[in-house]
Amino acid sequence: MDVLSDVVSAARTGRPHSGRVTRSAPFARWSPAAPSAGFHIVLQGTCWLIPSRGEPIALGPGDVAFLPRGSAHGLADDPSTPMSEPPETPTEVDGGRDDETPAGRAPTAVMLCGAYLLDGSAPHPLLNDLPEVIHLPTQVGRHRELRAAVELLGVELDSDPRPGSDTILLTLLDLLLLYILRAWFEEQRVSGHSATGWAAALHDPAVAAALRAIHGDPGRPWTVEELGAQARLSRAAFARRFTHLVGQPPLTYLTWWRMTTAARLLRTSDAPVNTIAQQVGYSSQYTFTHAFKRLYGSPPGSYRHHAGQSATPA
């Protein structure tokens, strides 16, 4: 699995949700911070996204707004419209429609809105590198795969449930998240804003090769020399380059990714702890438990129990 897919797979918990939202002016609804990554995509009309910090962002047809850390924000027809608090009992729009347009009035904005539940206990640095709000304005000829996913998702949400709808929606939401992230990293590369950080690491041939090796076989007892060979660099040159772009030395990141992989396996499988320890490169369950507790604050068994209690039913 490639690095970006791996990161998203490890971070995701529970089931994503989405719905078609229609609003007519005047409207302004505040959404508090949430432990999820949210998105808003304008299908028709216009609106404004009001972040908790920074200037309001105008959204037009085809624009995508993504909030990777679930930051508090508002959606409004105009930045000057007084903001209302969310209802005490949120409207359930998963796979359906939330239409507050009065009879006989044309909608101001028709949107696709949704969210992905993420494990926030030890977020991947790739996700931490993202800004509070990612705005991807529609551009002719740009990010065609993202636009195709949006169109398919809109069609699926705009029709009555049909055979296979549940699986199709989940698959399209997975694709949408990956396409949003891919588009943003590509924008950083094209604009020249990716001199350091994960946007640069993913597009650096040497570092990307080492990351693929780590993610492809996290249980292997990698050395800096072996990873440098994957990158086709000397040990010293590779270590400097990797640390500069990723923000961690190679073996520190390897350990971190092993624990992240172990956490995903604890959440999603019934494999014994000692089996998971071996899968991520630890012959000693005691050493694995110590390393896991240092990152997650609890031993593997307790983490699995808590994750099972808080899991969202599919």
Image: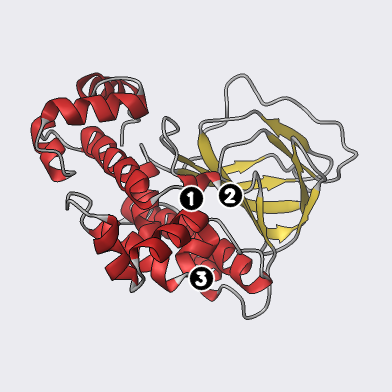
Residue 303 locus on image (x, y percent): 28, 23
Amino acid on which disc 1 is placed: Leu
Can residue 154 be seen here? no
Q: Quadrant of the C terminus?
A: top left
Q: Write the residue at 73% across / 34% down.
A: 29
| Residue behind mark 2 | 130
Residue 58 locus on image (x, y percent): 79, 54
Q: Quadrant of the N terminus?
A: bottom left
| Residue behind mark 1 | 126
Which residue is at the front of the view, 144 or 261?
A: 261
Residue 186 locus on image (x, y percent): 56, 69
Label 2–label 3 contact, CB within 8 A: no
Q: Secondary structure at mark 3?
A: helix
Q: Could you say which quadrant of the image residue 15 lies in?
A: top left
Which residue is at the front of the view, 234 or 200?
A: 234
Taking the image as shown, residue 86 lies to the left or right of residue 122, namely right
Taking the image as shown, residue 284 lies to the left or right of residue 48, namely left
Q: Residues within 10 Å of mark 1 (few under 14, many from 20)?
A: some
Q: Could you give the CA–CA distance between mark 2 and mark 3, rounded to whole angstroms?
A: 23 Å
